[in-house]
Image (cartoon, coloured by chain):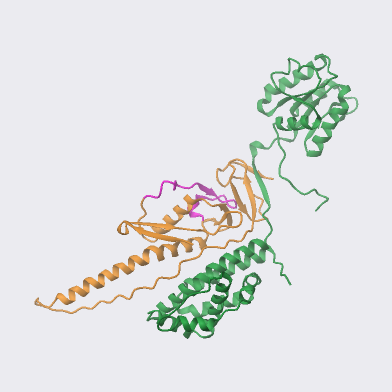
Chain colours: A green, B orange
């Protein structure tokens, strides 16, 4: 049965693996047998190590034949060309060296190492280090497979975080274009923006001019729609003036965006110094609007009712 | 994992260092003040300086680094805000790896060579003595220290969450539960985690 490991278990396995591997490879030679035993105990019991070593243990290899060939007068210490067979053989060699440490001695003598330091380092270099290196690689891969992808968050500079009362999007329109502007309103709202539409944003009995002015002051953009129903710019004059005033005050933090639909009249002269785009449908217009806005939305997240 | 190449009659040693990064290319760090761990994306120049620092701690002179190795940026700890050179914020594991590499690939060959030379000098002196007033015999034998296996670095667990600093576009990793980051680790800009 497949063992499922938590991220903490994986991290713990890797920490223990590295500690025991490095002790085996680098600690004082006097403690070598002890470190070999600890390392092999880890290999036999740790769930992550088992995932990697269980297939290697299943390979058909002959450690006795290798010891005999590698410890004779003209030693032959070659390994199988298949990487899985090689890993399996090295693992078996470590296990048999633990059972019978004299094998390390015999191997060292056959390779002209006359002292304990020499034959242990020779064994470490010839058998242990390549095994540890390959196991490090495979156990790292297994850890990657067993761990979900990292979450990602953003650290946003404070200067890029607007205040709550400066990110509205003012939708300026003629009554006859209300259905069109509502579509923009709802799309912006769904995405998480804060669109401003006169009748929706104004409490009953409010002073129209004052509320419109406040709407502009709390906005980062004013959007003007020029459609086929557009006849003259008189009705726009006051709102364009307010928008221009905000642009002067807020500079780059305020955008004046004009969307001109197909078959509409020319963009009024008042608005030509600012961004205007010819669009043939709402989707195109919406894309142009998003590109022109001085604000953007943040990190992708799961909807609250999903999790 | 690493390898070295001695040239110019032992005056220049080139170390090839290969560090274990996690799946996303991040190297584990440890603050040298509070000891807590975070990760940064690898910077070859930083590793070169870290290796140089280890060599100097082991009493070796470090000459010019290659052109690419401009002094790495300093880092501000995402936990305690301690600021230090990137080459000072490495884990014990990384420091031990670098020390073992320097010992194996530079110091040990130097020791063996020095004592082998001494053996030869004293041996020659012993054979040539006997003509003076005071004659003495001296025998010096050096047992060459066996070369230990090359150290291995990694593997690195793919843990922690990624934090992207929008001020400078650089990324770090911190533990999942850590949210109290209010300064960019690289450029110290005030930030808010969202």
- Residue numbers of the magenta segment: B64-89
Image position of B7 with respect to B151: above or below: above
Q: Magenta residues: mostly which secondary structure?
A: loop
Left or right of A25, for residue B108: left
Query: Of B118 and B32, which appears nearest the observer?
Result: B118
Q: Position of residue A188 (x, y in %)?
A: 80, 35
Residue A6 picture quarter = bottom right
Q: Residue furthest front?
A: A81
Left or right of B147, for residue A11: right
Residue B181 visible to the viewer: no
Residue beneath the point at 56% across and 66% down:
A136
Q: Residue furthest right?
A: A204
Quick check: is A83 in the magenta stretch?
no
Q: How many marks?
A: 0
Residue beneath the point at 60% across and 66% down:
A139
Image position of A184 with respect to A72: above or below: above
Residue beneath the point at 41% across and 62% down:
B102
Quick check: is B68 in the magenta stretch?
yes
Q: Position of residue B110 (x, y in %)?
A: 33, 65
Q: Position of residue A278 (x, y in %)?
A: 75, 24
Left or right of A283, for residue A36: left
Image position of A111 with respect to A216: above or below: below
Residue A110 picture quarter = bottom left
Residue A113 visible to the viewer: yes
Q: Quadrant of the N terminus of chain A?
A: bottom right
Image position of B187 with respect to A111: above or below: above
């Amino acid at each position: 049965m497949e063992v499922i490991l938590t991220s903490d278990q994986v991290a713990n396995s890797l920490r223990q693996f590295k500690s025991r591997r490095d002790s085996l490879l680098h600690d004082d030679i006097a403690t070598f047998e002890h470190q070999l035993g600890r390392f092999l105990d880890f290999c036999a019991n740790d769930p992550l190590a088992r995932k990697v070593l269980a297939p290697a243990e299943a390979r058909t290899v002959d450690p006795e034949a290798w010891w005999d060939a590698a410890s004779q007068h003209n030693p032959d210490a070659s390994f199988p060309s298949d990487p899985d067979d090689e890993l399996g053989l090295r693992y078996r060699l470590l296990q048999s060296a633990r059972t019978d440490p004299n094998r390390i001695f015999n191997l060292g003598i056959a390779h002209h190492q006359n002292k304990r330091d020499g034959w242990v380092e020779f064994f470490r270099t010839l058998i242990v280090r390549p095994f540890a290196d390959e196991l490090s690689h495979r156990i790292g891969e297994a850890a990657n497979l067993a761990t979900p992808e990292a979450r990602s968050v953003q650290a946003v500079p404070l200067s890029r975080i607007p205040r709550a009362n400066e990110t509205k999007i003012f939708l300026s329109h003629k009554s006859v274009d209300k259905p069109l502007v509502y579509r923009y309103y709802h799309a912006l709202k769904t995405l998480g923006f804060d669109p401003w539409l006169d009748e929706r944003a104004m409490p009953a009995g409010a002073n129209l001019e004052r509320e419109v002015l406040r709407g502009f002051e709390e906005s980062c953009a004013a959007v003007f729609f020029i459609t086929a129903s557009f006849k003259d710019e008189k009705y726009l004059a006051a709102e364009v003036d307010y928008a221009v005033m905000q642009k002067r005050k807020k500079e780059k933090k305020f955008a004046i965006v004009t969307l001109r639909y197909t078959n509409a009249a020319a963009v009024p002269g008042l608005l030509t110094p600012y961004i205007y785009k010819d669009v043939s449908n709402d989707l195109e217009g919406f894309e142009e609007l998003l590109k022109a806005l001085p604000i953007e939305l943040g990190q992708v997240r799961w909807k609250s009712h999903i999790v | 994992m690493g390898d070295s190449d001695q040239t110019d009659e032992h005056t220049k040693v080139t170390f090839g260092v290969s560090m274990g990064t996690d799946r996303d290319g991040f190297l584990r760090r440890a603050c040298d003040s509070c000891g807590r761990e975070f990760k940064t994306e690898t910077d070859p120049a930083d590793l070169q300086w870290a290796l140089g620092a280890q060599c100097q701690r082991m009493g070796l002179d470090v000459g010019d680094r290659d052109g690419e190795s401009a002094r790495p940026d300093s880092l501000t700890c995402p936990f305690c805000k301690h600021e230090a050179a990137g080459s000072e914020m490495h884990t014990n594991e990384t420091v031990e790896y670098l020390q073992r590499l320097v010992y194996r690939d530079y110091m040990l060959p130097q020791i063996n060579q020095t004592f082998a030379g001494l053996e030869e000098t004293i041996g020659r002196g012993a054979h040539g003595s006997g003509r003076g007033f005071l004659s003495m015999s001296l025998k010096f034998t050096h047992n060459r220290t066996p070369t230990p296996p090359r150290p291995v670095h990694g593997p690195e667990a793919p843990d922690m969450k990624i934090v992207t600093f929008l001020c400078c576009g650089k990324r770090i990793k911190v533990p999942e539960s850590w949210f109290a980051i209010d300064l960019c680790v690289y450029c110290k800009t005030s930030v808010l985690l969202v």
